[in-house]
Image (spheres, rainbow, N blue to C red):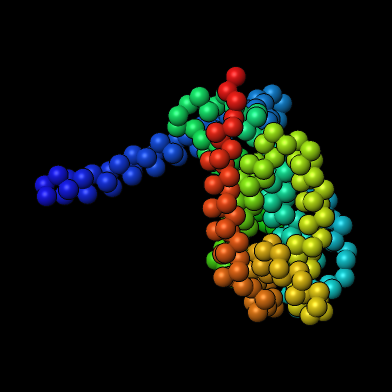
Amino acid sequence: MASVSEDLRSQPGVMRKGLRIQSRVIGALMMRELHTRYGRENIGYLWLILEPLFLATAVGLIHARSPNHFGGDIKPVPAALIGYCNFMTFRSMVSRAEGVLENNVSLFYHRTITPFDVLLSRGLLEQAGTLVAFCLLMGVAMATGIANPPERPLIYVAGVAALFLLSWGTSMVVCAITHERRTLGRVIHPLIYVLMPLSGAFFTMHALPKQVRDVLLSIPLAHCYEMMRYGWFKSAKSVYIDLAYLGGWILGLILLGLLLLSVTRKRIHMP
């Protein structure tokens, strides 16, 4: 009995130690990815923010003089920024998942580093870059009166978190199935661009005919965007958000991704 009680008391300490090690590994991998991708010369790390900033600015300017076809307080510029900036997170995480295992194979000599850690660190890096770019652009839009502050900020944050988890789960699946299958990897990029106009990033479900809306609501990204718009705009509707359906997709993709990565890791050829 004494040994059992001692084991139970020691479990929280072991978990805290494991979380500390995990956070250090993720932090180190994020810094390594920054060095590898952007280097230390010229503006270096600023490219993490400037790359999505330039692209999102271009999209915002295109919609600056567009008529307000959304209705209510859903203005074109903030709607476009919410749609494009968040889709950049999905696009970057999924498209860059191809070849992750081959490019980082030397890291797996360390027992504390797994494909899970590499993909999570890269995903957090992508999310950080697009989030900072979004905050800067939306801040300017609010300061100039083009956009209003979020009406339900916690719901908007929940939508962003759901999109991140969905993107991360998809990136794990893509990483695993494209390992040693370069031809399959080349199909991923055009599929992402086909998905962009179907994801609900640039239109509301309420404005679509029922037949079209029912088809597009089968795409889990659409529920993320409906949640984000409902969190930001007062006139946005929440009737088309299915949290159970979205949660099922997120949980299913993450579990499938973890399973596929565990199988794929056994096929990694160490140099």
Answer left or right for 40 relative to 69. left
> In which quarter of the view is residue 143 placed?
bottom right
Residue lying farthest top?
271
- Please count the marks in the image: 0
Answer left or right for 84 relative to 240. right
Q: Could you tell me if residue 188 is visible in this image?
A: yes
> In which quarter of the view is residue 82 placed?
bottom right
Q: Residue at x 71, y 64 (%)?
A: 219
Q: Could you tell me if residue 71 is visible in this image?
A: no
Q: Residue at x 60, y 69 (%)?
A: 245
Quadrant in the picture for the C terminus: top right
Out of 129 and 270, give the one closest to the viewer.
270
Answer left or right for 22 relative to 172. left
Answer left or right for 30 relative to 96. left
Q: x, y (%) of residue 171? A: 64, 46
Q: x, y (%) of residue 138? A: 70, 57
Out of 5 and 182, give the one closest to the viewer.
182
